[in-house]
Amino acid sequence: MNLDDLGLRIGSGIDGLDEVLCGGFIKDRAYLVRGGPGTGKTMLGLHFLAAGARQGERCLFITLAEPEKQLRQNGSALGLDLERVSFLDLSPTPEFFAESGSYDIFSPAEVDLEPITRRIVGEIEALRPQRVFLDAMTQFRYLAAEPFHFFKQVLSFLRFLVGQGATVLFTSEGSPTAPDEDLQFMADGVITLAATPQGRSLNVAKFRGSGFRDGWHALRLGDTGMTIFPRLVPDQPRDEIAGEIQSLGVPGLDELLHGGIERGTVTIISGPSGVGKTTLCLQLLKEVAARRGHGIVYTFDESVEMILRRCDAISLPVRSLVGQGTLQLQQIEPLRFSPAEFYRQVVRDIENQGARTVMIDSIAGFRLSLSGDDLVSDLHALCRDLRNRGMTVLLVDEVESITGDFQATETGLGYLADNIVFLRYLEVRGELRKAIGVLKKRLGDFEKTLREIEITADGIKVGKPLTDLRGILTGTPEWRHESGVTPQ
């Protein structure tokens, strides 16, 4: 029987955080929330207390920094109901400055510690809160005569709170001159908040009595408060993959792929700029829609209107499919999302639209537009997870070389793909032409030759195998003997 079944978990009140904590906080324990100024520590505490108040729990905010009035105003601005949350305001009052002369003889520890302790103990015994948030425990350090006394006072204080039946969150602002390792040792769990040029994030370093999701998780502070986007960790691979073959609707392409591509696989379409990668993917999505399927395109490179106009020019009915609701085009704004946020959006769209095919245009756009430290690994995790869900995934990968040495992909993600289809420019008798081929198809056989491909006003046309040409992958092929290569 797990902690949830025993009723020993309580929710954090923050979207995504309970998932990171594998169900929420464990009752009657003390957790440290640490981080620099402005990272969201107080906001996390407000969510925690508001969630308890909604369930009828007795909740107490002990503040040694911000006054109660300001905290309530901040909570109200975020839409958090703090009406039933009690506050013990121990923050300095305006009169403190005028009375500071009393410190000429006595140290701050001797003057402040005893009355503060009495007020806290009195409030706890009177209210018997089930949730306590203390902001910030660091303030007690300045009231202790020496580090050993601080350690004993804080440890005793936390045991007192937990002994009264409270689940406690307390904050600290560790710094090189005032580290908080001692507080980390005392806490049952440690949550670190960080804000860097790459974005905000949250990490759980310690969580006694339970597992948790490792790593740094994206964090967003918005008009409604804090949201956590757990780092994507794919589920175990499925043992089976859908065997249904999805036709591309172009005879030459289907012959090249021996019928098409299997549903539930990852396909990389690679090639240089302007060779037709996006068009080829949209052709497949058009066929998916014709069979009452639903597809979603996430474009990082082009605007939605530009894609629609290009499709209109080649008689590809993408605009009508969007109008019918069988195809969705979404433009992703640069640096708006972290990979985890983008994944959350993809999952939400899949569930709302019932989509089975997802197209990402392009891998380079994904890496440039999302904020993160290891976007190749993030894309790997995203594709693995979508495939495990039974989704068909199309990835557009732009390679830099127009001609010359052949390069299948630009990112080295070929190992992830079940299928790799590449497009290539050819120079034939001074004319620039295009060829298409298949490099990999895990679940079936494919044609080992290349074919010429054209994108015309009437759509995509693919010719017969180019068996009379040599050196196609170099971009400057030579004829073995004369033979037409006109697309069929």
Image (tube, rainbow, N blue to C red):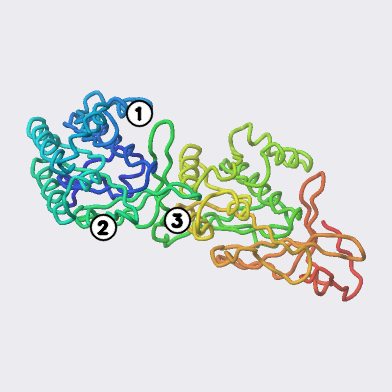
> In the rendered view, does 185 fall on the left or right side of 466?
left
Residue 300 place in picture, x, y as percent: 62, 46
Quadrant location, the C terminus: bottom right
Amino acid found under the numbered disc labelled 1 = Asn
- In this view, the mark in front (2 or 1): 2
Label 2 to label 1: alpha-carbon separation:
30 Å
Residue 333 place in picture, x, y as percent: 59, 41
Residue 232 place in picture, x, y as percent: 43, 53
> Which residue matches tag 3?
388
Return the disc, 2 or 1, that comes first in the chain's sequence.
1
Return the disc, 2 or 3, that comes first in the chain's sequence.
2
3 and 1 marks in contact (CB < 8 Å): no
Amino acid found under the numbered disc labelled 3 = Asn
Return the disc, 3 or 1, that comes first in the chain's sequence.
1
Label 3 SS: helix
Label 1 SS: helix
2 and 1 marks in contact (CB < 8 Å): no
Q: Residue at x 16, y 50 (%)?
A: 145
In the rendering, which numbered label is found on residue 347? none
Q: Quadrant of residue 165?
A: top left
Q: Is residue 395 above or below residue 297?
A: below
Label 3 to label 1: alpha-carbon separation:
42 Å
Amino acid found under the numbered disc labelled 2 = Glu
> Which residue matches tag 1?
74
Label 2 SS: helix
Residue 133 place in picture, x, y as percent: 22, 38
Label 2 to label 3: alpha-carbon separation:
41 Å
In the rendering, which numbered label is found on residue 181? 2
Q: Is residue 19 above or below residue 323?
A: below
